[in-house]
């Protein structure tokens, strides 16, 4: 956890309230003025721009544990649950990252919650914070590197798998080091996960995002309908039998049926229940 | 949204927000954290806002009934007649939902009635509506745009770089349309929006892709309050510009955006009452 940096705002040289002088879009980073403390832009992640070593997992993370996480992620995929961290940072579409006075806001073009990264404050008291798939993120600048510190992950919401191996838990701690490269045309984000129940040593990987051109405008995301039987057949085709069973059992109808069965059993005279 | 669940969820979310605010300062966190209680706030719509309810009704419809109804042209009235069932165009976008389930048979104790089906379908748009409901809304102002989100997925952007709203034929209309804006000297953000999907507008209005909405985000001089004044302009639909406004309070320093995580497998997203034990 990091202490808030007193007096260091979101944009040291950025907009101040309702100021004039809001210049061009800055989309063409090579041609416009480059502010190393402003990460705003639309950022794309190409498949060739990821450096992901294998994670060093603790012995307790057995194949059985990993299979269980994979099963839960399969259920999330099947039911179009929002992505959460870390998946939202590699969702196949550009990230709209805008930096303001008090926070950086990341709006994905995907089925995922936005990320709020707050400046100048400590983490919310965990006794108060409502855990989220994207956690509670705070940030400060160290030179030209933005350090983003995230805790407060939801125990179940969002995809849990972490690139390189391992998975997220409610106790995970993520530190992202963000730095503009190539005169602002590239954004490097180095992710470091620590979680004593998952990683033997901190697990670090890096993505390098490319700034989208000046004509880029965010588009609608790709729809996901969990009630489309054709999609369901398609997406579960590669599931293991256990994953298929878990996905089916997750439906509200299955849960309602199970609840009705339990209720019926409860109201059944004891003699019959025993006989059954 | 035609279901009864959303308001419950939103009230719950707001309750959590209230609960957060109710916590005493703890090590510089909570109410006293972040920007600090005494830090001056500039008069700007940037930041975290929650809608107020000046009439104290607790109901969106009751609040909007206090607005002056739209004066429609005959063509506007005809559009309302033919398209008014298409849902409130000014309202929320985000995750889609299905219709009502025919869940009318008596349920045993502990087995919830399902009131909604096919919830949490991601419609791809994920765009916010033109009006902010009782979830908080959060605006970040960068050099190129004002980016707005609420607690669910979806976002709205207001371009600040001086571009014009493109011709409606360039892209498909969307729930929050295409917005451009500029700041005035007192901190007011003036937003012009076009290219919206057809639908009804609050207080008896209607809109099409050609309709223009002007929103003035007017901060109070101390930066703690915000008015959003809507003016809908379309000579085909309105006899005169259709105007109403909402008011907002800036969230306390140290507050944070809650997450509305829509999960199609969560019965809470779909159920109504759970029959209790009868005594």
Image (cartoon, rainbow, N blue to C red):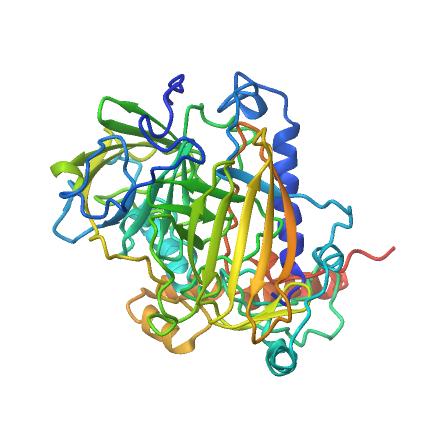
Q: How many marks?
A: 0
Horizontally, residue A153 falls left or right of residue B104, namely left
Q: Is residue A181 visible?
A: yes
Tell me where residue A267 appears, x and y as whole percent: 75, 62
Residue occupying the point 11% across, 38% down? A182
| Of residues B216 and A27, the one drawn nearer to the viewer in this rendering | B216
| Of residues A184 and B238, the one drawn nearer to the viewer in this rendering | B238
Tell me where residue B15 appears, x and y as whole percent: 66, 41
| Of residues A240 and A226, the one drawn nearer to the viewer in this rendering | A226
Tell me where residue A248 appears, x and y as whole percent: 46, 67
Residue occupying the point 18% across, 39% down? A184
Horizontally, residue B72 falls left or right of residue B169, namely right
In the picture, residue A148 is in which quadrant?
A: top left
Horizontally, residue B89 falls left or right of residue A245, namely right
Q: Quadrant of the C terminus of chain A?
A: bottom right
Horizontally, residue B98 falls left or right of residue A133, namely right
Position of B85 relative to A152 (above/below): below
Position of A242 relative to A145 (above/below): below
Tell me where residue A85 appears, x and y as whole percent: 36, 44
Q: Is residue A55 visible?
A: no
Farthest residue in the right direction?
B279
Q: Quadrant of the N terminus of chain A?
A: top left
Residue occupying the point 29% across, 41% down? A23
């Amino acid at each position: 956890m990091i202490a808030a940096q007193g007096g260091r705002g979101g944009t040291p040289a950025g907009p101040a309230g309702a100021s004039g002088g809001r210049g061009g879009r800055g989309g063409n980073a090579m041609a416009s003025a480059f502010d190393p403390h402003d990460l705003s832009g639309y950022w794309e992640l190409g498949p060739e721009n990821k450096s992901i070593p294998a994670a060093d997992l603790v012995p307790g993370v057995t194949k059985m544990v990993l299979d269980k996480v994979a099963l839960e992620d399969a259920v999330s995929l099947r039911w179009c649950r929002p992505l959460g961290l870390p998946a939202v940072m590699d969702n196949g579409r550009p990230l709209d990252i805008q930096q303001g006075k008090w926070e950086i806001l990341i709006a994905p073009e995907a089925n995922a919650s936005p990320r709020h990264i707050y400046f100048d404050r400590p983490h919310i008291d965990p006794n108060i914070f409502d855990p989220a798939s994207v956690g509670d993120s705070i940030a400060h600048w160290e030179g030209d590197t933005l350090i983003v510190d995230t805790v407060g992950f939801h125990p179940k919401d969002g995809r849990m798998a972490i690139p390189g191996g391992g998975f997220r838990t409610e106790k995970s701690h993520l530190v992202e080091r963000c730095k503009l490269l190539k005169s602002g045309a590239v954004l490097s984000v180095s992710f470091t996960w620590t979680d004593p129940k998952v990683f033997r040593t901190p697990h670090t990987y890096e993505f390098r995002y490319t700034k989208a051109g000046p004509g880029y405008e965010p588009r609608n995301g790709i729809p996901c309908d969990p009630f489309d039987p054709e999609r369901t057949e398609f997406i579960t085709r590669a599931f293991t039998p256990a994953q298929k069973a878990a996905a089916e059992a997750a439906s509200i109808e299955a849960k309602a049926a199970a609840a009705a069965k339990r209720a019926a059993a409860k109201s059944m005279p004891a003699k019959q229940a025993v006989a059954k | 949204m035609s279901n009864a669940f959303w308001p419950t969820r939103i009230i719950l979310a707001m309750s959590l927000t209230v609960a957060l605010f109710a916590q005493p300062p703890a090590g510089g966190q909570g109410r006293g954290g972040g920007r600090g209680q005494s830090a001056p706030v500039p008069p700007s719509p940037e930041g975290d806002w929650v809608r107020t309810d000046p009439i104290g009704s607790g109901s969106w419809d009751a609040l909007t009934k206090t607005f002056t109804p739209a004066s429609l042209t005959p063509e506007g009235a005809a559009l309302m007649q033919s398209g008014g069932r298409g849902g409130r165009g000014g309202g929320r976008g985000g995750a889609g939902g299905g219709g009502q389930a025919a869940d009318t048979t008596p349920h045993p104790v502990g087995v919830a009635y399902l009131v909604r089906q096919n919830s949490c379908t991601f419609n791809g748009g994920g765009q916010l509506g033109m009006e902010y409901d009782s979830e908080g809304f959060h605006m970040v102002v960068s050099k190129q745009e004002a980016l707005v989100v609420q607690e669910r997925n979806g976002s709205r952007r207001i371009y600040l770089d001086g571009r014009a709203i493109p011709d409606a034929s360039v892209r498909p209309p969307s729930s929050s349309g295409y917005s451009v804006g500029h700041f005035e000297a007192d901190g007011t953000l003036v937003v012009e929006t076009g290219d919206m999907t057809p639908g009804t507008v609050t207080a008896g209005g209607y809109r099409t892709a050609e309709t223009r909405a002007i929103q003035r985000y007017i901060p109070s001089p101390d930066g703690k309050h915000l008015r959003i004044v809507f003016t809908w302009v379309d000579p085909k639909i309105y006899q005169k510009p259709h105007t109403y406004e909402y008011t907002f309070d800036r969230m306390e320093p140290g507050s944070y955006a809650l997450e509305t995580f829509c999960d199609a497998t969560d019965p809470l997203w779909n159920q109504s009452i759970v029959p209790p034990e009868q005594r």
